[in-house]
């Protein structure tokens, strides 16, 4: 992020002249700070256009990151107390050039908002097949499938593949994953039961040969009785299984470490803990070179002060043989980023999608669902 000088124009109450300032600016955001807690209304628009701009109401954050701005663009940001008739201050800012994050030989982003739906998208997933990107999004209780141009993310077609199954309420479709490996479909899901009124789970793998599923293979030596959010992805001649541990969360709401294990089609290698800061969930990955590039939601940088409120999309370059993990801070914008998924377009090029909320679900100040976002993951240097 780049620190920039800010011109402040105040009108209305003189005491409000320095009530706010812009601390940091990127190609797509402006970090605002206010000198006192309050409920505010923000109005912002590109300065060089006649566009009416956008309005945010019920903003209660004393430090607020304004996102979805265009790169290299001047903006006017006006704000006022929630019940004021007129704005009490105007900030003038100009965004910088949007640039990818580069770390561990990987280039990630910049990420842009998908045009499929304006908001209220849950659990986006993506696959590359037959020259197209295939995106599934849960929107208003339906599952929508869109085909997209991998170069531009332009939507080529869109259909509803699952209608709302229950009138009057949405249905939680569960946590599971599947992948093609060695010409067969593999699935991973959770077997769930109650033990002393606490939920417990087993990770179960099944192979589908085109006619029927094989016998379930249970991860008997899983290091936790409450694994969650499993994902499976090919790596060489094995599958990489990633999952989080919810046992620690039962006693400490800010502890949810991340594990992985390899699976050879018959048995699991011992699991290894690879990240243990804050809460970490919904990891997905792809093989790029001889590394496994993975992404997950993590509140590691926020949990001490803000608990579950904000989550970044953290990426890692994992060596499945040694367990070594290099961290890549892919999306760090003081929002609740969630549920990433990756697909491989070529050996050195993957595409990632994820969902973005204003902050933790169901908070009222305001808990906007911004929709789904997409960006490129590129191998910057050959893997050794």
Image: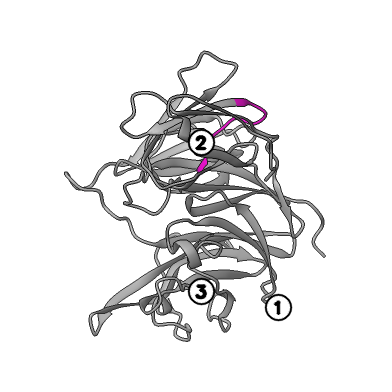
Q: Secondary structure at mark 1?
A: loop
Mark with earlier residue (1, 2): 2
Whether the residues at callouts 1 and 3 have beta carbons within 8 Å, the answer is no
- Identified at 42% across, 39% down, the residue is 145
**Relative to residue 142, is residue 236 drawn left or right?**
right
- Magenta highlight range: 64-74
Tell me the CA gap for discs 1 and 2: 36 Å
Q: In the rendering, which numbered label is found on residue 322?
A: 1
Task: Indicate the secondary structure of the residue bearing disc 2.
Answer: loop
Residue 263 seen = no
Q: Residue furthest left?
A: 168
Is 339 displayed left or right of 81 in the figure? right
323 lies above or below 358: below
Task: Point out the residue furthest to the top here.
Answer: 50
Residue hosting label 3: 257
Residue 302 versus residue 217 in the image, above or below: above
Q: Within the image, what quadrant is residue 191 found in?
A: bottom left
Q: Is residue 70 magenta?
A: yes
Q: Give the residue at x 58% y 69%.
A: 239
Q: Residue at x 47, y 42 (%)?
A: 372
Q: Quadrant of residue 276?
A: bottom right
Between circles 1 and 3, the one closer to the viewer is: 3
In this view, 291 is above or below 364 = below
Residue located 43% across and 40% down the image: 370
Numbered disc in front, either 1 or 2: 2
Is 375 on the left-hand or right-hand side of 144?
right
The label number, if any, that marks residue 114 in the structure image: 2
Q: Earlier in the sequence, mark 2 or mark 3?
A: 2
In the rendered image, residue 229, in percent from the top left (x then y), is placed at 44, 66
CA–CA distance in space, label 2 to label 3: 30 Å
Element on which disc 3 rests? loop
Residue sitting nearer the eye, 380 or 142: 380
């Amino acid at each position: 992020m780049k620190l920039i000088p800010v011109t402040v124009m105040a009108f209305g109450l003189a005491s409000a002249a320095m009530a706010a300032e812009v601390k940091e600016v990127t190609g797509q955001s402006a970090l605002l700070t206010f000198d006192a807690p309050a409920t505010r209304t923000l109005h912002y628009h590109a300065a060089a256009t006649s566009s009416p701009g956008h309005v945010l109401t019920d903003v209660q954050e004393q430090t607020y990151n304004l996102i979805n701005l265009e790169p290299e663009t001047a903006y006017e940001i006006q704000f006022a107390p929630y019940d004021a008739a007129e704005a009490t201050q105007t900030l003038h800012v100009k965004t910088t050039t949007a640039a990818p994050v580069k770390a561990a030989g990987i280039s990630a982003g910049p990420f842009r908002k998908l045009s499929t739906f304006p908001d209220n998208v849950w659990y986006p997933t993506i696959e590359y097949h037959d020259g197209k990107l295939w995106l599934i999004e849960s929107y208003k209780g339906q599952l929508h499938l869109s085909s997209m141009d991998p170069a531009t993310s332009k939507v080529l077609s869109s259909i509803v593949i699952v209608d709302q199954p229950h009138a009057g309420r949405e249905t939680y479709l569960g946590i599971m994953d599947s992948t093609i490996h060695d010409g067969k479909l593999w699935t991973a899901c959770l077997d769930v039961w109650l033990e002393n009124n606490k939920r417990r789970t087993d990770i179960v793998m099944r192979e589908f040969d085109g006619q029927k599923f094989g016998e379930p293979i249970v991860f008997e030596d899983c290091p936790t009785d409450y694994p969650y959010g499993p994902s499976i992805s090919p790596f060489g001649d094995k599958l990489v299984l990633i999952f989080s541990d919810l046992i620690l969360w039962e006693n400490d709401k800010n502890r949810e470490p991340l594990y992985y294990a390899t699976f050879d089609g018959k048995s699991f290698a011992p699991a290894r803990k690879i990240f243990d800061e804050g809460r970490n969930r919904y990891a997905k990955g792809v093989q790029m070179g001889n590394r496994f590039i993975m992404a997950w939601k993590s509140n590691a940088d926020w949990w001490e002060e803000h608990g579950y409120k904000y989550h970044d999309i953290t990426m890692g370059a994992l060596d499945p043989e040694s367990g070594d993990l290099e961290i890549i801070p892919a999306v760090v914008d003081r929002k609740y980023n969630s549920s990433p998924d990756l697909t491989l377009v070529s050996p050195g090029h993957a595409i990632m999608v994820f969902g973005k909320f204003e902050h933790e679900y169901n908070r009222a100040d305001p808990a906007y669902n911004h929709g789904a976002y997409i960006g490129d993951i590129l191998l910057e240097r050959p893997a050794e």
